[in-house]
Image (tube, rainbow, N blue to C red):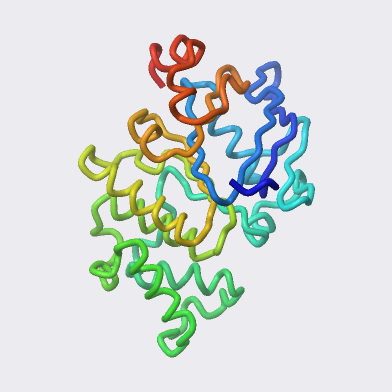
Amino acid sequence: MSTQPVLETQNVRKEFGSLVAVDGVSIEFHTDEVVGIIGPNGAGKTTFINLISGALPLTDGSIVFNGEDISTLRKYKRVRKGLVRSFQIPQIYDEMTVFENVQSSVLSRKQENNRLFTPVHRDTESVEETDRLLTMFNLGDHADEHTEHLPHGVRKVLDVAMSFALRPEIMLLDEPTSGVGSREKNAVMQTITEAAVEQDIGLVFIEHDMELVRSYSDRIVALHEGRVLADDDPANVMESEEVNQFILEGGV
Protein backbone atom coordinates (compact mmCIF):
# COMPACT_ATOMS: atom_id res chain seq x y z
CA MET A 1 0.00 0.00 0.00
CA SER A 2 1.21 3.52 -0.79
CA THR A 3 2.37 5.40 2.29
CA GLN A 4 0.58 8.70 1.67
CA PRO A 5 -3.23 8.63 1.52
CA VAL A 6 -4.87 10.17 -1.52
CA LEU A 7 -8.08 10.77 0.40
CA GLU A 8 -8.40 11.41 4.13
CA THR A 9 -11.40 12.25 6.28
CA GLN A 10 -10.52 14.02 9.50
CA ASN A 11 -13.08 13.86 12.31
CA VAL A 12 -15.94 14.39 9.87
CA ARG A 13 -19.33 14.95 11.44
CA LYS A 14 -22.81 15.37 10.02
CA GLU A 15 -25.84 16.43 12.01
CA PHE A 16 -29.44 16.54 10.83
CA GLY A 17 -31.02 18.57 13.59
CA SER A 18 -30.57 16.53 16.76
CA LEU A 19 -29.59 13.40 14.80
CA VAL A 20 -25.86 12.74 14.46
CA ALA A 21 -25.50 10.61 11.30
CA VAL A 22 -21.69 10.66 11.11
CA ASP A 23 -19.80 11.20 14.33
CA GLY A 24 -16.09 12.04 14.10
CA VAL A 25 -15.00 9.62 11.38
CA SER A 26 -11.30 9.66 10.46
CA ILE A 27 -10.21 7.26 7.67
CA GLU A 28 -7.40 7.18 5.10
CA PHE A 29 -7.83 5.84 1.56
CA HIS A 30 -5.18 4.92 -1.02
CA THR A 31 -5.22 4.34 -4.78
CA ASP A 32 -3.88 0.79 -4.57
CA GLU A 33 -6.66 -0.70 -2.45
CA VAL A 34 -10.31 -1.71 -2.48
CA VAL A 35 -12.15 -0.69 0.68
CA GLY A 36 -15.55 -2.15 1.56
CA ILE A 37 -17.79 -0.18 3.92
CA ILE A 38 -20.32 -2.16 5.93
CA GLY A 39 -22.81 -1.40 8.65
CA PRO A 40 -26.46 -1.81 9.58
CA ASN A 41 -29.15 0.48 8.15
CA GLY A 42 -28.74 3.90 9.73
CA ALA A 43 -25.04 3.42 10.41
CA GLY A 44 -24.13 6.49 8.33
CA LYS A 45 -22.60 4.71 5.33
CA THR A 46 -24.32 6.61 2.52
CA THR A 47 -24.17 9.88 4.44
CA PHE A 48 -20.43 9.39 4.80
CA ILE A 49 -20.06 8.86 1.03
CA ASN A 50 -22.27 11.90 0.41
CA LEU A 51 -19.96 14.00 2.55
CA ILE A 52 -16.87 12.83 0.68
CA SER A 53 -18.40 13.43 -2.75
CA GLY A 54 -19.76 16.86 -1.81
CA ALA A 55 -23.43 15.90 -2.05
CA LEU A 56 -23.83 17.01 1.58
CA PRO A 57 -21.99 19.75 3.52
CA LEU A 58 -20.00 18.85 6.62
CA THR A 59 -21.15 19.91 10.06
CA ASP A 60 -17.58 19.62 11.30
CA GLY A 61 -14.22 18.10 10.37
CA SER A 62 -12.41 18.16 7.06
CA ILE A 63 -11.83 16.17 3.88
CA VAL A 64 -8.35 16.19 2.34
CA PHE A 65 -7.58 15.03 -1.20
CA ASN A 66 -3.96 14.89 -2.38
CA GLY A 67 -2.98 17.18 0.47
CA GLU A 68 -5.66 19.80 -0.30
CA ASP A 69 -8.59 20.57 1.97
CA ILE A 70 -11.64 20.10 -0.28
CA SER A 71 -14.23 20.29 2.50
CA THR A 72 -16.12 23.18 0.86
CA LEU A 73 -15.34 22.34 -2.76
CA ARG A 74 -18.36 21.79 -5.02
CA LYS A 75 -19.08 18.31 -6.40
CA TYR A 76 -18.01 18.95 -9.99
CA LYS A 77 -14.70 20.41 -8.83
CA ARG A 78 -14.02 17.28 -6.76
CA VAL A 79 -14.69 15.21 -9.87
CA ARG A 80 -12.18 17.25 -11.85
CA LYS A 81 -9.59 16.62 -9.16
CA GLY A 82 -10.13 12.86 -9.40
CA LEU A 83 -12.75 12.06 -6.75
CA VAL A 84 -15.68 10.44 -8.54
CA ARG A 85 -18.87 8.79 -7.32
CA SER A 86 -20.91 6.13 -9.09
CA PHE A 87 -24.50 5.81 -7.93
CA GLN A 88 -26.73 3.04 -6.60
CA ILE A 89 -29.13 3.77 -9.47
CA PRO A 90 -27.18 3.93 -12.78
CA GLN A 91 -26.92 7.49 -14.10
CA ILE A 92 -27.06 6.72 -17.81
CA TYR A 93 -28.88 8.06 -20.88
CA ASP A 94 -31.44 5.58 -22.18
CA GLU A 95 -31.88 7.39 -25.49
CA MET A 96 -28.21 6.81 -26.31
CA THR A 97 -26.21 3.69 -27.11
CA VAL A 98 -23.65 2.15 -24.77
CA PHE A 99 -20.85 3.59 -26.91
CA GLU A 100 -22.41 7.06 -26.89
CA ASN A 101 -22.88 6.98 -23.11
CA VAL A 102 -19.23 6.19 -22.47
CA GLN A 103 -18.05 8.67 -25.09
CA SER A 104 -20.19 11.38 -23.48
CA SER A 105 -18.22 10.92 -20.25
CA VAL A 106 -14.92 11.05 -22.14
CA LEU A 107 -15.96 14.31 -23.81
CA SER A 108 -17.29 15.69 -20.53
CA ARG A 109 -13.90 15.14 -18.92
CA LYS A 110 -12.31 16.99 -21.81
CA GLN A 111 -14.89 19.76 -21.22
CA GLU A 112 -16.33 19.41 -24.70
CA ASN A 113 -19.95 19.22 -23.56
CA ASN A 114 -21.06 21.46 -26.40
CA ARG A 115 -20.26 18.58 -28.75
CA LEU A 116 -22.41 15.96 -27.06
CA PHE A 117 -25.30 16.40 -29.45
CA THR A 118 -23.27 16.87 -32.61
CA PRO A 119 -21.51 14.14 -34.62
CA VAL A 120 -18.37 13.05 -32.78
CA HIS A 121 -17.50 9.90 -34.71
CA ARG A 122 -14.55 11.70 -36.30
CA ASP A 123 -13.00 12.56 -32.93
CA THR A 124 -10.39 9.81 -33.14
CA GLU A 125 -9.02 10.35 -29.64
CA SER A 126 -12.38 10.01 -27.85
CA VAL A 127 -13.43 7.09 -30.08
CA GLU A 128 -10.24 5.17 -29.27
CA GLU A 129 -10.54 5.87 -25.54
CA THR A 130 -14.18 4.79 -25.57
CA ASP A 131 -13.25 1.55 -27.33
CA ARG A 132 -10.61 0.85 -24.68
CA LEU A 133 -13.11 1.39 -21.88
CA LEU A 134 -15.70 -0.85 -23.55
CA THR A 135 -13.09 -3.59 -23.81
CA MET A 136 -11.93 -3.11 -20.22
CA PHE A 137 -15.48 -3.45 -18.90
CA ASN A 138 -16.51 -6.26 -21.28
CA LEU A 139 -19.11 -4.02 -22.92
CA GLY A 140 -17.92 -4.35 -26.51
CA ASP A 141 -20.76 -6.67 -27.53
CA HIS A 142 -23.28 -4.08 -26.30
CA ALA A 143 -21.65 -1.03 -27.91
CA ASP A 144 -24.45 -0.31 -30.39
CA GLU A 145 -27.35 -1.21 -28.10
CA HIS A 146 -29.56 1.47 -26.55
CA THR A 147 -29.19 1.25 -22.80
CA GLU A 148 -32.91 0.94 -22.01
CA HIS A 149 -32.74 -2.66 -23.30
CA LEU A 150 -29.74 -3.74 -21.21
CA PRO A 151 -29.90 -6.21 -18.30
CA HIS A 152 -29.56 -4.47 -14.93
CA GLY A 153 -26.11 -5.91 -14.28
CA VAL A 154 -24.80 -4.55 -17.56
CA ARG A 155 -26.32 -1.15 -16.77
CA LYS A 156 -24.43 -1.17 -13.47
CA VAL A 157 -21.14 -1.91 -15.21
CA LEU A 158 -21.86 0.78 -17.81
CA ASP A 159 -22.46 3.35 -15.08
CA VAL A 160 -19.09 2.52 -13.53
CA ALA A 161 -17.38 2.58 -16.94
CA MET A 162 -18.74 6.09 -17.49
CA SER A 163 -17.33 7.12 -14.14
CA PHE A 164 -13.95 5.57 -15.02
CA ALA A 165 -13.96 7.69 -18.18
CA LEU A 166 -13.58 10.72 -15.89
CA ARG A 167 -10.18 9.29 -14.85
CA PRO A 168 -10.61 9.26 -11.07
CA GLU A 169 -7.95 8.50 -8.52
CA ILE A 170 -10.59 7.39 -6.02
CA MET A 171 -13.98 5.94 -7.03
CA LEU A 172 -16.89 5.88 -4.58
CA LEU A 173 -19.50 3.18 -5.22
CA ASP A 174 -22.85 3.01 -3.43
CA GLU A 175 -24.06 -0.61 -3.53
CA PRO A 176 -22.63 -1.52 -6.97
CA THR A 177 -24.57 -4.81 -7.06
CA SER A 178 -27.91 -3.49 -5.80
CA GLY A 179 -30.71 -5.00 -7.88
CA VAL A 180 -28.32 -7.35 -9.67
CA GLY A 181 -29.19 -11.06 -9.73
CA SER A 182 -27.19 -13.40 -7.53
CA ARG A 183 -25.48 -15.03 -10.51
CA GLU A 184 -24.35 -11.67 -11.89
CA LYS A 185 -23.01 -10.11 -8.70
CA ASN A 186 -19.57 -11.69 -8.77
CA ALA A 187 -19.15 -10.91 -12.46
CA VAL A 188 -20.01 -7.25 -11.85
CA MET A 189 -17.58 -6.93 -8.93
CA GLN A 190 -14.86 -8.87 -10.73
CA THR A 191 -15.10 -6.57 -13.75
CA ILE A 192 -15.03 -3.40 -11.64
CA THR A 193 -12.17 -4.44 -9.36
CA GLU A 194 -10.01 -5.72 -12.22
CA ALA A 195 -10.46 -2.42 -14.07
CA ALA A 196 -9.56 -0.50 -10.91
CA VAL A 197 -6.37 -2.51 -10.43
CA GLU A 198 -5.43 -2.06 -14.09
CA GLN A 199 -5.92 1.71 -13.89
CA ASP A 200 -4.48 2.11 -10.34
CA ILE A 201 -7.77 3.55 -9.09
CA GLY A 202 -8.76 3.24 -5.45
CA LEU A 203 -12.24 1.82 -4.84
CA VAL A 204 -14.43 2.60 -1.85
CA PHE A 205 -17.73 0.73 -1.95
CA ILE A 206 -20.78 0.25 0.23
CA GLU A 207 -22.18 -3.27 0.04
CA HIS A 208 -24.65 -5.41 1.99
CA ASP A 209 -23.53 -8.75 0.55
CA MET A 210 -20.92 -9.89 3.04
CA GLU A 211 -19.48 -12.56 0.74
CA LEU A 212 -18.76 -9.91 -1.90
CA VAL A 213 -17.21 -7.62 0.70
CA ARG A 214 -15.01 -10.42 2.00
CA SER A 215 -14.01 -11.56 -1.49
CA TYR A 216 -13.20 -8.22 -3.10
CA SER A 217 -12.00 -5.95 -0.29
CA ASP A 218 -8.39 -5.38 0.70
CA ARG A 219 -9.71 -3.60 3.78
CA ILE A 220 -13.09 -3.31 5.47
CA VAL A 221 -14.43 -0.35 7.42
CA ALA A 222 -17.37 -1.16 9.69
CA LEU A 223 -19.59 1.72 10.77
CA HIS A 224 -22.08 1.66 13.62
CA GLU A 225 -24.18 4.61 14.79
CA GLY A 226 -22.04 6.98 12.74
CA ARG A 227 -18.71 5.85 14.19
CA VAL A 228 -15.93 3.52 13.05
CA LEU A 229 -16.38 0.18 14.74
CA ALA A 230 -13.50 -1.53 12.91
CA ASP A 231 -10.99 -0.70 10.16
CA ASP A 232 -8.77 -3.64 9.25
CA ASP A 233 -8.20 -6.48 6.79
CA PRO A 234 -11.29 -8.59 5.97
CA ALA A 235 -10.44 -11.54 8.20
CA ASN A 236 -9.90 -9.43 11.31
CA VAL A 237 -13.03 -7.36 10.76
CA MET A 238 -15.24 -10.37 10.09
CA GLU A 239 -13.91 -12.10 13.21
CA SER A 240 -14.36 -9.04 15.43
CA GLU A 241 -16.75 -9.63 18.32
CA GLU A 242 -18.14 -6.10 18.01
CA VAL A 243 -18.74 -6.43 14.27
CA ASN A 244 -20.50 -9.75 14.80
CA GLN A 245 -22.60 -8.35 17.61
CA PHE A 246 -23.70 -5.08 16.01
CA ILE A 247 -23.57 -5.83 12.28
CA LEU A 248 -23.34 -9.42 11.14
CA GLU A 249 -25.78 -10.99 13.60
CA GLY A 250 -28.28 -8.20 13.15
CA GLY A 251 -27.92 -8.11 9.37
CA VAL A 252 -26.85 -5.19 7.22
Is residue 172 depicted above or below 164 in this figure?
above
Residue closer to the observer: 208 or 169: 169
Residue closer to the observer: 231 or 225: 231
- Determine which quarter of the picture holds residue 82: bottom right
Q: Left or right of 141: which side holds 126?
A: right
Q: Residue at x 28, y 48 (%)?
A: 187
Q: Left or right of 203: which side holds 211?
A: left
Image coordinates of residue 96 in percent, x first then y, are: 35, 69
Residue placed furthest toward the left: 183
Residue closer to the observer: 79 or 186: 186
Is residue 99 depicted above or below 31 in this figure?
below
Q: Residue at x 56, y 22 (%)?
A: 230
Give the total of numbered labels: 0
Q: Left or right of 205: which side holds 20?
A: right
Image coordinates of residue 74 in percent, x first then y, are: 71, 52
Of the 4 image quadrants, the one containing the C terminus is top left
Is residue 100 depicted above or below 187 in this figure?
below
Q: Residue at x 67, y 49 (%)?
A: 6
Image coordinates of residue 121 in percent, x first then y, are: 40, 86
Q: Residue at x 31, y 39 (%)?
A: 179
Residue placed furthest toward the bottom: 122
